[in-house]
Each structure stands twice: as C-alpha cells, then as structure tokens.
Amino acid sequence: MPDLRTNTGGIHSPNPFWLASAPPANSGLQIQRAFEAGWGGAVWKTLGIPIQNVSSRFGAHTIGGVRGAGFSNIELITDRSLDINLREITETKRLFPKHPIIVSLMVETESEWRDIIKRSIDAGADGLELNFGCPHGMCERGMGSAVGQEPTVNERITGWAVKHSSVPVLVKLTPNVSNIVPHGMAAQRGGAHGVSLINTIKSIIAVDIDRFVPEPRVGSMSTNGGYCGAAVKPIALHMVAALARERDFKLPISGIGGICNWRDAVEFILLGASTVQVCTEVMLRGYGVVEDMIDGLEQYMRTHDFSTIDQMVGKAVPACGEWGELDLNYETVAKIDASKCIGCQLCVAACHDGAHQCIHPVEGTRVPTVDESECVGCNLCQIVCPVEGCIELVQVDNGQARASWNEHMTEGKPIRPKKGAH
C-alpha cells in the first residue's frame, strides 16, 4: 500500500490533500466534516480583523458547457469574530489531533502579527499561512497582494511572523506578478518554512449585458475579483514549476490552483509540490471529492512504483526547461487511424484555417489524408479530434542530431530546414 503521508515545511499530514483557505474552511464544523470525509489537512479561512462582506460575491464562467470551469469571488477574509474562530480551532484540533490545522492570517502591524500568531498557536494551530495574495478588498488596505507584490515587504513581514511563531510558517504567494521567483525568494530570505501558491488571479469574470454591470453584481456595481477553478491550473503549474526549477530556492511547496481530481494533484506533485490545496472543486461538488482523489493517487503510485509521496515530488522538474533548450531537430507528423475516423472533418477545418494546410479531404472516403511533407507536428488536429486515439503524433527519423537554439547559437549545431513554409 503506498504511503500518502507528507511533510511540508515541518507540517505533517496523513495525505497530501488539504482544504485551501476559503469558504470550505470557514468554520470548525465544516473542517470537522472534511476530515471525516478524508481530507488530510485544512488551511483555516483567513483570520484578521473581521470585515463586512458583500452580496452577491461569487461569479462563474462556463467553458464548453462545463459550469464553473472558471470561478471568481469578491469575498474577503473571515467575517466571524476572532474568539469564535479560535475556539473552533481548539475544538477541531481536539477531535482530530492527527490532522494538521494551518491558520491563514492577515493583519498589518508587527504587534498585530505577534498577537494573532500567539493566539492561533495557543488555540492549536500546527502551522501558519501568511495571506500575501488576496487581490481585492484587502490589497486596497495595504494587505494581501499589496504585500505579495513587494518582495521587500514580503520578506519583512515574513520575518516578523517567523520571529514570533513556534510552528512552521508558510507564505501564500500572489500570481499577480510578472515573475514568481523573486517573491518566493523573498519568503525564503524572511525565514519561511515553505510557500503555497497560487492565490487567485485578479479578474473580471463576466458582464451582465442587459444591466451593463460586471458580475458578481452588488446592487448596481461590481469590482474585480479573484479568478480560480479548473481554468487557472496551467498558470498555477507554471508558477509552481518556476520555483521548483530555481536552483537557489530550497523551500517546500504546497500547490494550489484548479485541482479538480487526482490527475491534477499528481501533476502538481510531479512539478514540485508536496501537498495540494483545493477550494473551488469542493465548493462545486462537496467534500466527498477527496475519496476519488485518494483512490486515484494510490492507484497511480502503485502502477508507477512509487511507495511514498517524496519519491514523486519534482519528478517532472528536470524535463521542464526554457524554450532555447528544446530540440529543434525533433520532428513529428500526424497519423490518422482510418479504423477510428468518423469523418467529421474537424481536423481538416482546423489545419486549413488555423495551422499549416497539410490535412486534406479525400473524395469518396470519410478519412482525410496528411501531407507529411508539409506537416509540422503542431498537434492541433489531435486536439480538435473528438475520437480518442484516432490521431497520433509519430516521431520521424530525419537523420538530424539533437540541436537546441542555444546550442545552435553557441556551438553552431545545424538545425533542420523549416517545414510548412509557403
């Protein structure tokens, strides 16, 4: 049986699946139900000076008929009193002593940080997560992403938290930056025990085209919110990988952003995360989604001969490089399996209008043909094909030795002639 136990910066968990700091982790009763369902840990919804939230506060984006594939919120930190939250943390920890409770925090001054850290630890927190990512509401008050976008401020406040904490400190990073690496390095310099990323992306989810107001609508107005859900996974994976690839970055990572199933979790782990945090999928489907996540992860580990999560962490990082390192002489062409082709001609339309005009209809047959002399192996045909396994990209032995752009420029290695030029 694979061992799902994890260690992220000194925070030990029975499995890598944590609730992210969000509405599903808003109260003790919720987190207790989540632990009963199988979640390994939970990051408590951000504590600070309680605020007044608005109504409405959520918006969603439908993609290809999938409702909520993109999700947005303009909700802020907890609107419940600090005393109530701390009392519920104590009770939840008493009931589930083996499940880590990480308390998300957001305040302003060092004295406020010192006070809320002490009270959180006294209540039973196993770790802290500093919310440097909220992209709306709190950043206008000098907190959230206003801190996360300034490495010097990130480092200073992280240092305050580490100085006053006796439990591990994670820094939650904002994606609303051009390069995540300086911000992860700032957290490391501040003494953090790990980082979590990504927080939500500043966005406007939609516009009510009859009322002429962006959504979610609060009376006759709206504002930018935080984008999350399945649609943000590629951005989150990129930022996790960017930190994991950085030679001087040594902190463990808790991955967040668009994790909907076990495959998503595996991708984050292979790119460097030791735990993953989930919010939107729980909001849309409930705590029970973790059962399939655990089962799928265990099955994956068995079939790939992984006995521990640590053996998986970062396994794909060496294969993630810069464009200039890619082999320009590696060549593929599309092959269509006639026995599977349904004759929809979607590949023809996509190739002719969006790619390199190398797939052509054939009179008298439903199966298009590929002009391999013009095919550049772009993969668009396979993406639009509705039949699994009908179109494959097959490597071509063109007799050329490996040569990247960097090698071509520095060592003069030859690169193959360009195909598909008309």
Image (cartoon, rainbow, N blue to C red):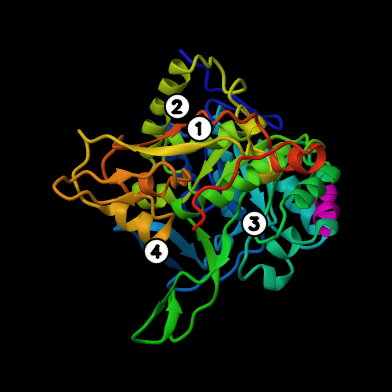
Task: Determine which quarter of the picture holds residue 10.
Answer: top right
Separation of residues labelled 3 and 1 (CA atoms): 21 Å
Dot 1 or dot 4, earlier in sequence: 4
Residue indicated by mark 2? 297
Residue indicated by mark 1? 266
Dot 3 or dot 2, earlier in sequence: 3
- Residue at 44% from the left image edge and 60% from the top image edge: 71
Whole-percent x and y of residue 28?
Answer: 50, 45
Residue indicated by mark 4? 61
Q: Which residues are magenta?
A: 153-160
Do the residues under discs 3 and 1 have CB atoms within 8 angstroms?
A: no
- Residue at 30% from the left image edge and 53% from the top image edge: 348
Whole-percent x and y of residue 199?
Answer: 60, 54
Considering the numbered disc 2 on the image, is that residue within a helix, a strand or a loop?
Answer: helix
Q: Amino acid at mark 2?
A: Leu
Q: Amino acid at mark 3?
A: Pro
Q: Nearer the viewer, residue 31 or 325?
A: 325
Considering the numbered disc 4 on the image, is that residue within a helix, a strand or a loop?
Answer: strand
Do the residues under discs 3 and 4 have CB atoms within 8 angstroms?
A: no
